Image (spheres, rainbow, N blue to C red):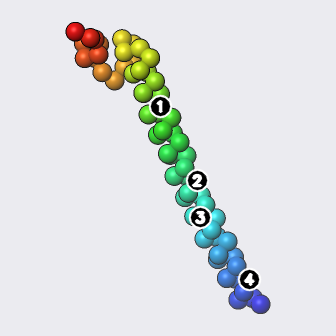
Amino acid sequence: MINQRKWMMLWLNKTEQSRKVLLGRNIENILWFTFLERQLRNFTTSPNKRNSPLPISATKEV
């Protein structure tokens, strides 16, 4: 019985750790995608804004 309880505690610790790792990765991914989306929105809405990734001359039509 004691061994079983010990094993259960180990298993719970493992799952908790993996859950934290997965959550951390998810948060990283969400942050990264929101950043990319913001960059894309900045670029598509107004190319002549200062926070545009490309210079104005590169986006102007000739």
Q: Give me the C-alpha separation between circle 2 and circle 3.
A: 10 Å
> Any mark on residue 37, and which?
1
**Picture layout, residue 46 above or below residue 41:** above
Q: Give me the C-alpha separation between circle 4 and circle 2.
A: 27 Å
Quarter occupied by the N terminus: bottom right
Q: Which residue is mark 3?
A: 17
| Crowding at mark 1 (Cα within 10 Å: few <14, some 14-19, many 20+) | few
Can residue 50 be seen?
A: no
The answer to whether mark 1 and mark 4 are in CB contact below 8 A is no
Q: Amino acid at mark 4?
A: Arg
Q: Give me the C-alpha separation between circle 4 and circle 3.
A: 18 Å
**Seen in the image, is 3 located left or right of residue 54?**
right
The outermost residue toward the left is: 62
> Any mark on residue 5, and which?
4
Discs 2/1, front:
1
**Picture layout, residue 23 above or below residue 3:** above
